[in-house]
Amino acid sequence: MSLYVASTLTNVALISFLALSAYLVLVVGEVSFGQQAFFAIGAYVTATVTAIFGGHIILALFLSTIAGGLAALLLAALVIRLSGLYFAIASLCFAELLRLTLLRIRIPLEIDGRSTGMDGPEGFSNIRWIFENDFEVTDFLILTVVCLLALLLLLFYFERTTVMLRARLVGRDSLLAQSLGVRPDHYRMAFIGLSGMVAGFGGALFALFNTHIEPQMFGVMLGVHALAYTVIGGLGAPLGPLIGVGIDIGLLESIRALSEYRMIAFGGLVAVLLIIFPQGLLSPRAVNRLWGRIRRRDV
Amino acid sequence: MDFLQTSIDGLLFGSAYALLALGFSLIFGIMKRINLAYGSSLLFGGALAVWLEPIIGWGAVGVFLVTVLGAAFAGIYVERLCFSPHLGKTGVMASMIASFAIWMQLDEISSQLLPHRTHSFAGIDIEAVSFSGIILRGDQILHFWVAVVAIGALYWTLYRTRFGLLLRASADDPDTAYLLGGKVARLGMATFGLAGVLGGIAAFLILSSDGQITPHFGLWSTFKGLIAMMLGGVGSLPGAIVGGLLLGFAEAHVTFYLGAEFRDILTFGLLLLILVLRPGGLLGEAIYRTGRLAAERI
Amino acid sequence: MLSIENLSTSYGLIRALKGVSLTAEDGKVTCILGPNGAGKTTLLFTAAGILKPSSGSVKFDGAELAGSSAPRILQQGLALVPENRLVFPQMSVRDNLLAGAYIRHRSEATEIAEDLENMFDRFPVLKEREEQTAGTLSGGEQQMLSVARALMSRPKMLLLDEPSLGLAPLIVDEIFSIIRQMNNDGISILLVEQNAVKALEVADHFYLLDQGKVAFSGTPGEMANDDVIKRAYLGEH
């Protein structure tokens, strides 16, 4: 596998974490423009743990996940009364505030003669964990894909539980859910928190893979892209977001011949795709029909 | 004295923000959707104007006309491709993501029209006015008056014409408006066109004041318009005006007292604070009470 | 005269109307009774052009309206007052009424202004609330506004969908006296009601709709003597 292919695939897998985190928020009926914030938090925590304190990767991943989840809970607690457009813009504000704050924090350090630590717009350089542990690009790809598959299996299992059913009910009709005894705010808090954990974990891997991170990487474009992948892919199953990522990055690569005109073609293509499949490719209805067909065959 | 000068500068600049916010509010009022491609359609108008300037001539007047018409045309294009196919209740998400995709597309087209990173944009030279120590920049006075005229024209259209009546009726209840014989189907196009004209005017004012145009203008104006609208109150026209002026005022003071790097932090912080404390915006309805929140899910 | 022939309308696979035929005479009040889900609202919506029929015809003064758009049907003089009092809550009472005249031509501006004054004469409570937003009106006032708004298009026939729904008895009496008054002024009315007792006071002819079909047709006298209807709609045993 060429280096180029391997690193492209790794990027696909890393962005998939972010798309899955946007998916979890969408399940409870909210739109977040701010998932990149938790991704960034995961990345900066892992960078700090590994590059400054020389911590173990397991510890770094663990702390990043927790930090992402806590940040998401903080946001959720602030804006739990909001929904719809208001929630979306509040999450955008939160993420932009974080990014602008990261731009201001300058604590440059020198470790083993290399500059590292948070340095405002210059970012956080020399996150050397993959070099120190002799990770090739393909090794890291395997690590990322294994983590992603584990997460997917977890979500697939989760999908058949009553918790997920209730969460979807909250997402579809919060009033109806309330009348059935489900507490929408609890589910929304929990799922936003979970989404922060998933994003934080993905951000941690992102920092390790890139070895250099800077605030500008975590702009609103990243978050809206993740959201777009989820919507194109469909909300029916956790595979939806992955399909979205595949279509975008896959298509981007395949029509690279168009080079500069790429976004012109791609933007139009997405709009047309959404006219044909307004619910995304794997819409809840399509998934239900598919399940029905599979089950009938079993009988 | 500094305080007064800064306040006036901020409010004059804020009049352009108010126009941006009005465009957003108009679209939200009629469609109950947000148009992420709004800023990009304005950028497209500006880029087209710069591109066509040597062909058309006419100096600043030509640039103004092309900017406004280009923005309105791009707005209608966005409506056709992203909003009119997704009118149902389930289409909210799809229309937003489609408008994001077209945002990318229009940004790219504009970048193609502007091969260098920055291009000069036709400015208007008006002499500054000063009295008792306060200096008013000529272009800012122009900003203000153009915004006043544009807002006046908008109010006249909305409250004094048949089209305005239909527009307001449709914002309240599109099904009933159709029942009364309104041609509701074409209303979306008209709204996007109108929002494009307002935004195009704002874009021309801002770009000519800066004397340059960069591809960042799309994202920038989407943010400013959205923030100003949400500060004042979603879907409320007076709210959009107040929100725009307030944003200009606050930005000018933060830039003056704390430095430009704190400007955006303040903007987003202020908006988050208002969303947490009074989510309907300053002049918006108290959204919890009316229960409209549920209806306005995006 | 509105004459509906063999009209069928479906929502997807569900056939809500299965060949309904009825006529509403000029200058009369025709009332359609029926349980929930009988297809009453579907019938009015189809006649008003909001729903498209799958077959059958809707003739109004000889012109075929089936399949026409709502604005065109309104232009022919057939105005619908939907149930649940759909006013424009954010607009003033006056603007609501003007919106009702949207269909009329620009050149009628003076007539429209006259009609506005007529509406205020007929509904004095609306005059009091002229500049208030419609959302602040009480249920009965909103129903009057909704009727007045429909009248602003100068219809020949009004299609009224359950005007008494959810209103207090005194207000219901007022609404029915308005219906009679409008009828005396020469406007034909096709009324959908659940309140059969009140409907008996105003209607000249009755139809009973059940499961998408006309189950009964007769004068008020015939209806009052029908045992089934008596039991189901008039509360007599």
Image (cartoon, rainbow, N blue to C red):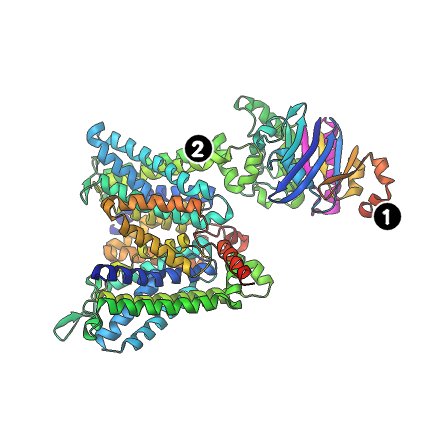
Q: Residue at x 21, y 62 (%)?
A: A3
- Give, as a single range, the part of the protein colored magenta: C157-186
Q: Position of residue B121 (x, y in %)?
A: 21, 38
Q: Quadrant of residue B181?
A: top right
Q: Quadrant of residue C100?
A: top right
Q: Amino acid at mark 1?
A: Glu
Q: Residue at x 39, y 49 (%)?
A: B97
Q: Is residue B132 left or right of residue B19?
A: left
Please name whichever residue, C149 or A277, is drawn nearer the observer in this view of the structure: A277
Q: Position of residue A291 (x, y in %)?
A: 51, 59
* Helix, strand or loop under label 1: loop
Please name whichever residue, B188 or C100, is drawn nearer the observer in this view of the structure: B188
* Helix, strand or loop under label 2: helix
Is the residue at mark 2 from the same chain as the one at mark 1? no
Q: Is residue C172 magenta?
A: yes
Q: Residue furthest left?
A: A113
User: Residue C29, can we see it?
Assistant: yes
What's the CA distance linking mark 2 and mark 1?
59 Å
Q: Quadrant of residue C225?
A: top right
Q: Is residue C202 magenta?
A: no
Residue under numbered circle 2: B156
Q: Is residue C177 left or right of residue A40?
A: right
Residue under numbered circle 1: C236
Q: Please report, as a chain letter, where disc 2 is located.
A: B
Q: Callout 1: few (<14), some (14-19), or many (20+) C-alpha neighbours within 10 Å?
A: few
- The relative height of residue C228 versus residue A155 in the rendered view (above or below) is above
